[in-house]
Amino acid sequence: MSSTLPLPFFGGTCTKAAFSFSLRSSSPLVPFQRLHLFRSTSRTTTRIRSSLFHSLKAKATAELVQDKESGVVATGKPVVEHSRTFVEARSEQELLSGLRKEVDAGRLPPNVAAGMEEVYQNYRNAVFQSGDAAAVGVVLSNMTVAFDHWLLDVEDPFVFEPYHKALREPFDYYMFGQNYIRPLIDFRNSYVGNLSLFYEIEEKLKQGHNVVLISNHQTEADPIIISLLLEKTNPHIAENMIFVAGDRVITDPLCKPFSMGRNLLCVYSKKHMYDIPELAEMKRKANTRSLKEMALLLRGGSKIVWIAASGGRDRPDPFTEEWYPALFDSSSVDNMRRLIEHSGTPGHVYPLALLCYDIMPPPRQVEKEIGEKRIITFHGAGLSIAPQISFPEIAAACEESEAKDAYSQALYKSVSEQYNVLKSAIHRKQGLEASTAGVSLSQPWN
């Protein structure tokens, strides 16, 4: 569920296969805090949420959604209205020149503006790779919304709770993310494996059961990509899945609006626990609060939770350049298993494989700083689920002291097998003739 993303105006056509962008921030991380959707501060900010939505049918229709508050607060002090520079832009030139206007007005930091312009160029070129005749309108519509909400968060920064529920009104951040990432996915070369198991999961959720998806993790956009791959066949799962999210996707300024549209349980990753040593204790306490929130959610039943069991994104082998799921952290897997078992409601653990690294691959190495260098391309994606794996069955076949690791290894093996199926299927579709004989895959999108 993806972070950040001085260039001249771009007037040519796409000639490169990939485009990188970067925006770094030295701001220290802050604890997760309670929030109010419209917070009062020393400088009250009126949020006017405006956007142009790209049609769900991927055509060039758009609608303006606006939420306006009164011009005077209860204290009698005049409010500062959200700038309409970006929502009123009607062309690429007007949109990009608006960055200079906001910087000159002191409403937008120059480094953030530079990152916004760079992500525009990269997103534009990646969408153009699709060959969509409506690409110009799609880019302008989606980037207008993105620019407006990046500026909105600079004016009034959003703070995530330990459990964040997707914001669907007055502005629908979920659909914002769907519409933004959709043009980057080559659906004709995308697959969902073992689709019948997703229908099985839907039935279990209706019965009040909990489901945990133990998955690999490849891009910052994984939550949105998963939702896009399931939105036609399993919209309930797509919209209600809860993602265990690291702190980086809720602190990066150009990533936050996308995270606001997902159901998130916010945690600090072990890989970044000691990036700033003096914040380590705060991070541990924040993670404890998030675990308590998760326990409460599971007690209510009918929850589906996705977790990246490795604690981070997959990386390519440094020698072969091949991508494989990163090894799972058995402690993370065991924590989720115990939370399910102690929830008081039936629970099920399924292995889930995700293949989408080409769309937005991570840096080759884990980085401490917020705002990494990125690459964006138009590419197919794959999602495949395997039958649930029972802990008692695994534990019965080994010593008690080995059960935790054996269970994690069984899940990892299943994810790896599904990943290889997806990898082969997508490769065949792209390179030769599509052939899914003997492989349980759904049909590619039309």
Image (spheres, rainbow, N blue to C red):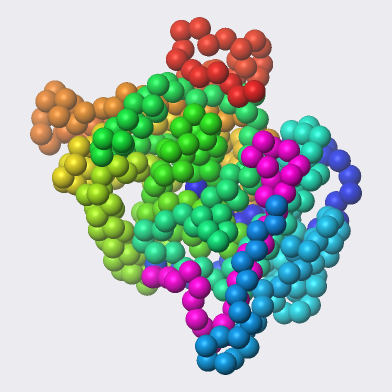
Residue located at (35% from left, 43% from top)? 305
* Residue in the picture at 38% in, 70% down: 34
Indicate the quadrant containing the C terminus: top left, top right, bottom left or bottom right.
top right
Magenta span includes 37: yes
Residue stretch in magenta: 33-62
In-image side of 336 versus 266 (left or right):
left
The answer to whether any part of residue 23 appears in the image is no
Q: Position of residue 230 (x, y in %)?
A: 50, 33
* Closer-to-camera residue (294/391): 294
Residue 398 x, y percent position in the rendering: 13, 26
Outermost residue toward the top? 437
Q: Please state which of residues 298 and 407 is positioned toward the viewer in this rendering.
A: 298
Residue found 37% across the figure and 58% down from its top: 163
Q: Is residue 290 above or below residue 35?
A: above
Image coordinates of residue 80 in percent, x first then y, are: 65, 82
| Left or right side of 207 for 117 | right
Q: Is 422 located above or below residue 227 in the figure?
A: above
